[in-house]
Amino acid sequence: MESDLEGRIKTLAQWMFEANHLVVFTGAGISTESGLPDFRGPDGIWTRMDKGLPPKPMPSWDSAQPNKGHLAIVELQKLGKLKFLISQNIDNIHLKSGIKPELLAELHGNIAKLRCESCETTTDESLNLKGCPHCGGKLVSSVVNFGQSLPRKDLELSFYHSKKSDLFIVVGSSLLVTPAAYMPREALGSRAKLVIINEDETPFDPVCHLRFNEKIGDVLPQAIIESKKLMGIT
């Protein structure tokens, strides 16, 4: 692996340019620059809890806005390079940023969405619907709590695109929570290049092809700029 940041960013940009099926996988770390806490980071929710510290003040979920990392992924979508985005986050920021719903699997749900217990259709909570608009089933929070099953359709799509990927980029995830964390393994099994952008260690560090411990906002946007140069876009 290249040790200097500029060289590693150029390598990532080259791989983005060459990729035919690029998949991005995001965790709570991508939203820390929007003011939301992560879980296992140096000042994360569980880290502070383990130390007996109170949670840090944070903005309301509704007011949290996309940051440079989110917008860089949207740029991949605009360039036609993003084939699928898998997220562990429930903060709704990916949809706020402009990611197309059909390109997004939210494995742990979305705080702004309700899910039908029968057909798994999701609807905006703000619509105040009495039942599912498709089948009339009961609408409940789409957020997946510990012990609950992940949404079947999102999980199936995530496995499908992970297996099909030739470049799999992990952004802001410790890769400790399963079954979501199985996705990089599926990508590696299909001989995809695995890139990890996360400040803390992950179980996949020894087997990834490119590793960034730097802040997401210092890596992804610049990699997009370099990749656009390769595409002849200024």
Image (cartoon, grey):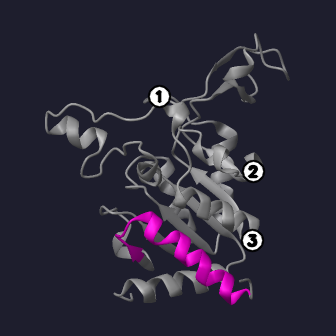
Question: Disc 3 marks which amino acid?
Answer: Leu
Q: Nearer the viewer, mark 1 or mark 3?
A: 3
Q: Position of residue 90 (x, y in %)?
A: 53, 38
Residue 9 within the segment the image draws in magenta: no
Residue 77 located left or right of residue 92: right
Is the residue 112 above or below the residue 166 in the image? above
Question: Disc 1 marks which amino acid?
Answer: Asn
The residue positioned 62% from the left and 29% from the top of the image is 112
Q: Quadrant of residue 24?
A: bottom right
Mark 1–mark 3 Cα distance, whole angstroms, equals 35 Å
Say whether marks 1 and 3 touch (CB < 8 Å): no
Q: Which stretch did the figure color magenta?
A: 211-231
Q: Which mark is residue 226?
A: none
For residue 191, say whether it is visible: no
Residue 165 located left or right of residue 197: right
Q: Residue furthest right?
A: 134
Q: Which mark is residue 145?
A: 1
From the image, give the main secondary structure of the stretch colored magenta.
helix
Question: Disc 2 marks which amino acid?
Answer: Lys
Quarter of the image where the C terminus is located: bottom right
Say whether marks 1 and 2 touch (CB < 8 Å): no
The residue positioned 68% from the left and 59% from the top of the image is 84
- Residue of label 3: 79
Q: Which mark is residue 100?
A: 2
Mark 1 Cα-neighbour bin, 10 Å: few <14, some 14–19, many ≥20: few
